[in-house]
Image: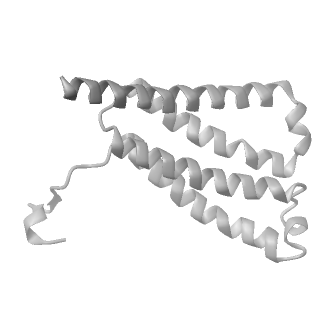
Amino acid sequence: MSSATVERGRDQRPAPSGLVASGVIELAAGALSGWVYAAVRYDGDGARKLRIKSPARIRQWHLDLIALGTGTVAIGLAVPNAPKGIQRSLAGGAWMNAMMFLPLAYRPELLANPVYRALGLGSFVATSVGFTGMAVSAVRRLRADRR
């Protein structure tokens, strides 16, 4: 950091939005979850040691954290200052959607549980509202800019 970006010990660069920060943290969690995936994938006894019944769900969990974290960062940077409710819906839904795979690694039968299914549906609603709302915000800004 150069002295031009620091004044009185404070970083003068703009802080990322809550949505972007959430996506960056989710992406970091995805990177860290790769250790669990590697333990399950490359250690023949890894899944048993970790009491994992469905190793494929660990892969889904790992990839969803990375994909949704990346998508959240990208759309948060592409459409800054979108409505807060839309941003919150996306951030919450992205985390919830990815994290829904982890319990299934340990208890695959949860997929038939009505409470689990309702939570899963809620995560899809939240991400759908979030990503679609961000797209609507982007299109509105584009149209307004063309006028």
Q: Position of residue 116 (x, y in %)?
A: 79, 31
Q: Position of residue 87 (x, y in %)?
A: 43, 32
Q: Is residue 88 above or below residue 3?
A: above
Q: Which quadrant of the structure image shows residue 46?
A: bottom right
Can you name the residue that lies furthest to the front here? 146
Query: Is 98 on the left-hand or right-hand side of 8?
Result: right
For the C terminus, the quadrant is top left
What colour-coding does the image apply? one colour
Q: Is residue 61 above or below residue 18?
A: below
Q: Which residue is at 43% across, 31% downward?
A: 135
Q: Which residue is at 73% across, 66% downward?
A: 37
Q: Which residue is at 16% across, 58% downward?
A: 10
Q: Position of residue 36 (x, y in %)?
A: 72, 66
For the N terminus, the quadrant is bottom left
Judging depth in this view, the residue of 67 and 97 nearest the camera is: 67
Q: Which residue is at 72% across, 41% downward?
A: 100
Report the number of numbered marks.
0
Judging depth in this view, the residue of 63 and 4 nearest the camera is: 63
Q: Which quadrant of the structure image shows residue 92?
A: top right
Q: Position of residue 129 (x, y in %)?
A: 53, 25
